[in-house]
Image (tube, rainbow, N blue to C red):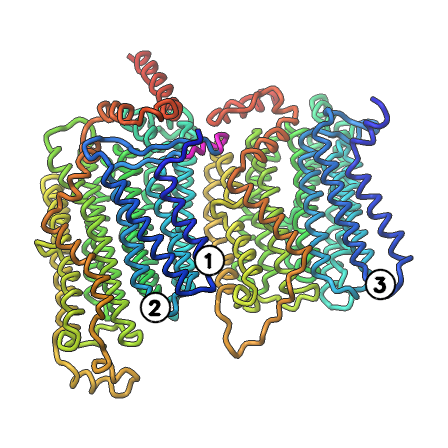
Amino acid sequence: MNSIGPLTLLTALPIAGAVLVLILKRAQKLSRAVAIVIAVAALLATLVLWARFDSAAPGMQFQEVHTWAPSVGLTYHVGVDGLGILLLVLSAVVVLMSLAASWRNASHGPVYFALVLLLEAGLFGTFTALNFLHWFIFWELTLLPAFFLVRLWGGPQRGRASVQFFFYTMVGSVALLLAFLALYLATGTYDFTTLAQMAQNGGLAAALQQNLHWGGWSGGHIALILFWAVFLGFAVKTPVVPFHGWLPDTYSEASSETTMLLTGAMSKMGIFGFLRILLPIFPAQMQEMLTPLLWLAVASIVLPAFAAWRQKDLKRTFAYSSVNHLGYCVLGVCVAAKLTGVDPSLAIEKSAALTGVLLQIFSHGLTAAALFWFVALLERRSGGLRGLEDFGGLRKIVPVFCGLMGIAIFASLGLPGLNGFPAEFLIFKGAFPLAGWAATAALLGLLLTAVFLLGILQKVFFGPLGKGQLETKTDTNSSSLPAAMRDLSTTERFALAPAIALMFVLGLYPQLIAGKMAGTVTQWTTPATSATEAYKTTAPKHNAARLEAASGAWLIHRKAQAGKAQVAD
Amino acid sequence: MNGSMTVLRILPEIIFTLTGVAIMLIDPVMPKQASRKPLGWLAAFGALAALIASLYQYSLPVGTAYFGVVQTDAFSVFFHVLISGIILVSALVVLDAVHPDTESLGELFALMSFGAVGMLLMTSGVELLLVFIGLEISSISTYILAGFRRKTAKSPESALKYFLLGSFATAFFLYGIALTYGATGTTRITDIAAGLATSHALPIAVVGLAFIVIGLAFKVSAAPFHLWTPDVYEGAPSPIVGLMSTAPKAAAFAVLLRIAYEAFPQLQNHWMPLLWILAAVSMTIGNLGALRQKNVKRMLAYSSIAHAGYLLVAFTVLSTDGVAAASFYAVAYAVMNVGIFAVISHAGGYEDRLTLIEDYKGLAYRSPLLGGVMAFFLLSLIGIPFTGGFFGKFYVFAAAIHSGMIWLAIIGLLNSGIAVFYYLRVLTATYTKPMDSSPVLNVPRVSAPLCLAMALTVAVTLVLGIIPGRVLSMARHAAETFPVFSTQQTPVPGTASAVMAAINTKAR
């Protein structure tokens, strides 16, 4: 019971770091350096895990089970599959990028760095937890540092934005909690893996039918209601279009370094939920509700692209573009849901879509974080200006900056050779045969993305320099903008270089990620029984007994189900 | 049963009485100018002794004493521990907040101790007349405490309002007891259930129960009997509000639980819908009312109405889970409310220097400790994980969903969404950098008693939020003392319906 595994240590590392940073608060420089060191260490640790992660094996790895509060079904159960490890690495990368971007921002003191580290711990906890309650606790915990990061360091409207952000997410979480309470009541477990097994062998609906007496609804109906409640939770977090109201304000009012975290890492919590919870536990419901879901996905792709086009503010543009990019992920998940169960005919398309989703998760995290980093650099140079109209012809003054930001923009619009392309290509490759109309409609979003991103490129980087700009700007305080602008310093170039390099690497060799994901994707696309076996065999030997205990609940349940099935026959 | 055992059954009550009497005796013989703070410490030590005595009572066998009017069981002891703990922390908070020259400070501490006696008797009494006497003792003490800042306009007004409406409520309660006696021929809570079975005047019993519920609903400030709450909380001194928004309420909830589940289980079809409505209305009115408040104390008054509503949700569940959830929530709510009022009493002072939410702007910058503790309790009130507030709400709504109270759970969860708004408003204010032009807010140094009070409440809130298992099992144990549930073993999750069925068959 007492051995502490690598995932627990990984989650504890940033917490310890945050405490250390707060202790060293007086020594500003030192404490911030400590924060960076901790972030680098966390990244290295995730990379070690990545290297030791067995790509071929399906199921959870590095598992750990401890008792916590058994009376309420709360177990400490962590483990990662391909999705988990990918998100661990991504969070570590984005946090490090964000901290590096904050390095030169004098207003971000040690408390800021400590909060970011706490957020990292929350993310690690969320992405590794396999018990709903345990997961939910971390899910809510990420909200706290995020709230304070937006609240304390941001634009003039940050107070309103942070409350909006908190409120939206809370409502989503409440729905999520309600649904899982009902699930727990019916099944007696919060374990994701167990619940997924039950969903696949049909035990879930039966259990709901049997144990919940909600005005005579059938198990299927209850499952559908629970599905929408859970969906709401993730739709707010991701966000999916009608639930995105908090996003533009929050992203644009938060300081750009914070937005890097929000869009790069925290928005992935929603997609994680889609893949870890919605798809495995409610596959039948997703299938049943496929058409409305696809409409929502398409709306999340196309409408924000239009909105982004109309924005006059760089941060708002990128904020909407973020919704658009995550819309592809939602589309990929939805089309993958079309074929659940035993239907090998379109398995290739399905695994293409899912691999695409995983690639897109990483790719968007990297690109969006990089884009907001560039915005942060631009803001610092222009004294807080970030309107599209405020700039023009930057390429002539700051060529290196424009070159690198241009690469990030092209990555974002999905230029072949950069990281955005393979991800979106795979999603569309899967989506066309499975849901042709939705994929076609979504193409419009792809087109619009290109339009507004190239628009930015043209307005900000090219266009008339100085003269026109000076004329319109004479009466404002920013008249000296272009002249005062410095290009990227050597440190900044070095800091940005790995991120840009990674974009090329992933663009040219997506197998780097896709290869690691193979086992997980296979597990998602193959029928239930083999996955069950895999879950049992991949468990580390010394953990076997504990896992037996953890999985005992569903084993008993399965036996009961089998018995019932026989009686029914 | 030997004599010493009988005394042990009311040991915490005796300790509080002796403390109060000692304070009353010492106060006049102290020199006029001398600081009364030692009396406060005496009250705090009395409360600590009572707390230890309450914990000791866990080792006593279940039984009654003094002609069967008081009963020691896991349920009464659970609430004894809670109330003694609240008095202890409140005494520390008062010690910190008052000036040495505050008038008649000795009386204040004596009244706190005497009030505690009444509350403890309410929870351990199984004879309705004793419960009534306990209710009166605690109410009269709190009426006087509410009006303790005599020289201000608001405080006496608040005391008068509280007194007038409170007297009505206790009158209702007494009338309810009389009607119950008429219908069943007994005022012993444990005998009423048997009396009802043979009663020829059930309608009278129903009316009696309704009156009792009205009287207690007033005491716990459940809507629509809540109108006094904001005015009284606004006028009363802050450290006292921390006390009177928790301890008397916990006691009244205990009485309500005992009466509903032990005396009137047969009438559950009557009281359950009633409490359902009370719960839904309290949550909604409390939260909507709190949204509009500018005064922190009024806001917390409305929030306490809402929390009473959450607690009532657990009442409607009709199972050990429900009673356990209600007891657990009472603890979680009491601890965080006392905690937040500890901060408010210190920052605002005994004279209420700071009352508006705007006044709290920049508190976290002036005193990171106070700001941090305030933020912590606000987050707990919202129900963020790792705090007692989270598991409190979690158990209540889990229990409600278990027993099929889906709509009540949904109403409650929507309400806790609304609640986020007004708690965050205070939270953002504390973390807003104050304007340079705004008047400088002088926060006095944090004294030792306050540190102790904050440390205690924060620690308990964290324990409830991280390792809730022990307290929950104690609450569950307490719930099992009711004979309605005694035929059942601890219900495994998922079999709440089985418990329901058992109650129903018993009822028939």
Instruction: Tell me which chain the residue with mark 2 is part of.
Output: A
Q: Residue at x 32, y 51 (%)?
A: A266
Q: Are marks 3 and 2 on the same chain?
A: no
Instruction: Tell me which chain the residue with mark 1 is part of.
Output: A
Q: Position of residue A551 (x, y in %)?
A: 36, 24
Q: Position of residue B257 (x, y in %)?
A: 65, 35
Query: In which quadrant of the rendered view does residue A81 lie?
Result: top left
Residue type, numbered disc 2? Asn
Residue type, numbered disc 3? Ala
Label 2 SS: loop
Residue B491 shows in this picture:
yes
- In the foreground, A239 or A24: A24
Q: Which residue is mark 2?
A: A105
Left or right of residue A563: residue A529: left
Q: Residue at x 77, y 68 (%)?
A: B151
A233 within the magenta span: no
Q: Quadrant of the N terminus of chain B?
A: top right
Left or right of residue B480: residue A235: left
Left or right of residue A55: residue A257: right
| Magenta residues, start to end | A69-76
- The tag on residue B34 is 3
Q: Are marks 1 and 3 on the same chain?
A: no
Residue type, numbered disc 1? Leu
Q: Against A489, is B42 above or below?
A: above
A74 within the magenta span: yes
- In the foreground, B438 or B211: B438
Distance between the alpha carbons at the discs numbered 1 and 3: 43 Å
